[in-house]
Image (cartoon, helix red, strand yellow):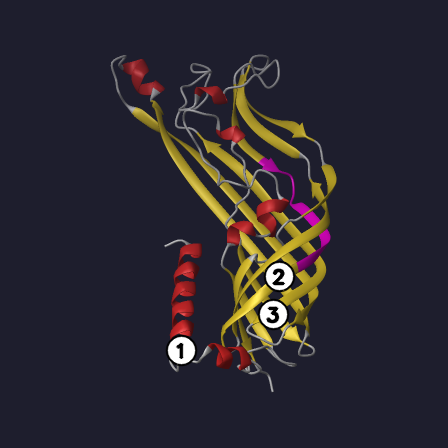
């Protein structure tokens, strides 16, 4: 079962339990209005731990480009065009209350996505021996991506009832990297300079002496980095003592640095008459400033508070 589905189920069970407990004595509307929620709310010295209920809408889901969908290797298309960072980031946060209303909040996010895809290609060696052969070899494509983030800030709470307004801000840092690797069942040789592969469109004329080269890897030279500041506004609904469901919207200004990107190819060198591996620089390092309503940390979350006194 997917991560968010597990939390959705947990959320449903928690809300149902809270509703049952809250309605057991069937208080009147007036009694409910006058109810004292002091023991439900966080107090000075309390600590909390929270988990994202909607990891798709977290910081790295928006900080890095082309992260709306997971990578997909389609034999009818071109895997080179499908580089994407993961969008299923797990977000964990913690809070320490300096007073009943003021707290320090930290958020740690991380994500790891690995996908392997295998496809059949014609076995050229078998076909050379028997033109009617239907033998196959396997081409392998592998995608790997890592992402992480850390945010530290302060929050201020308003309200004494079961729903509190939560306002805050702070600093955040994020990083990530991704790569695609290729392995082929048919080797490049003098007798077979353009072997069969499962995705023929991968062949490219990288340099004049490699008229037909196929990729071995596509990767960033180092991590993508992003650092910035954010402001946040949201609410927390306490469905049980010291247990809250939260939602927030963030606005942030951050600086992003993308390292140079290189691609590694192999092909038959028409000058040296040898199998050659070539590294092609395809994108220089670049940087940018961005300002907008990016979601930093958990956008929808569940938080549990614990007293330390």
Dominant SS in magenta:
strand
Q: Is residue 192 above or below residue 162?
A: above
Between 121 and 33, the one nearer to me in the picture: 33
Quarter the C terminus occupies? bottom right
Q: Which residue is mark 2?
A: 234
Give coordinates of residue 270: x percent, y percent. Answer: 56, 12
- Secondary element under disc 3, as helix, strand or loop, is strand
Q: How many badges with numbers are in the image?
A: 3
Q: Is residue 63 above or below residue 102?
A: above
Q: Which residue is mark 1?
A: 21
261 to the left or right of 35: right
Quarter the N terminus occupies? bottom left
- Secondary element under disc 1, as helix, strand or loop, is helix
* First in residue order: circle 1 vs circle 3: 1
Q: Is residue 19 above or below residue 183?
A: below
Q: Which residue is pictured at 43% across the width and 16% down the height?
A: 192
Give coordinates of residue 63: x percent, y percent. Answer: 63, 46
Between 279 and 221, the one nearer to me in the picture: 221
Q: Which residue is mark 3?
A: 164
Instruction: Using a 10 Å C-alpha cutoff, classify the residue at mark 1 as few (fewer than 14 neighbours), some (14 to 19) or many (20 or more).
Output: few
The magenta stretch spans which residues? 219-232
C-alpha gap between disc 1 and disc 3: 21 Å
């Amino acid at each position: 079962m997917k991560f968010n589905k597990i939390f959705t189920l947990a959320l449903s069970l928690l809300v149902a339990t809270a509703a049952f407990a809250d309605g057991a004595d069937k208080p009147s509307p007036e009694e409910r209005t006058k109810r004292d929620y002091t023991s439900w709310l966080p107090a000075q010295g309390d600590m909390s731990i929270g988990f994202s209920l909607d990891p798709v809408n977290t910081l790295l889901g928006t900080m890095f480009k082309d992260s709306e969908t997971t990578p997909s290797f389609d034999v009818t298309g071109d895997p080179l065009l499908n580089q994407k960072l993961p969008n299923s980031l797990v977000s964990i946060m913690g809070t320490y209350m300096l007073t009943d209303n003021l707290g320090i909040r930290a958020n740690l996010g991380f994500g790891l996505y690995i996908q392997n895809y295998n496809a059949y290609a014609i076995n050229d060696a078998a076909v050379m021996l028997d033109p009617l052969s239907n033998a196959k070899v396997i081409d392998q494509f592998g995608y790997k991506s890592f992402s992480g983030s850390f945010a530290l800030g302060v929050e201020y709470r308003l309200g004494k009832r079961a729903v509190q307004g939560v306002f805050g801000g702070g600093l955040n840092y994020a990083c990530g990297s991704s790569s695609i690797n290729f392995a082929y069942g048919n080797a490049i040789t003098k007798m077979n300079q353009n072997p069969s592969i499962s995705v023929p469109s991968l062949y490219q004329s990288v340099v004049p002496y490699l008229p037909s080269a196929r990729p071995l890897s596509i990767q960033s030279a180092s991590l993508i980095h992003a650092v910035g500041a954010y402001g946040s506004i949201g609410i927390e609904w306490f469905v049980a003592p010291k247990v809250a469901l939260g939602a927030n919207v963030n606005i942030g200004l951050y600086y992003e640095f993308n390292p140079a990107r290189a691609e590694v190819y192999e092909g038959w060198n028409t000058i040296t008459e040898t199998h050659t591996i070539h590294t092609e620089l395809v994108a220089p390092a670049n940087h940018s400033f961005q300002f907008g309503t990016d979601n930093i940390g958990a956008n929808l979350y569940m938080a549990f508070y614990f007293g330390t006194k």
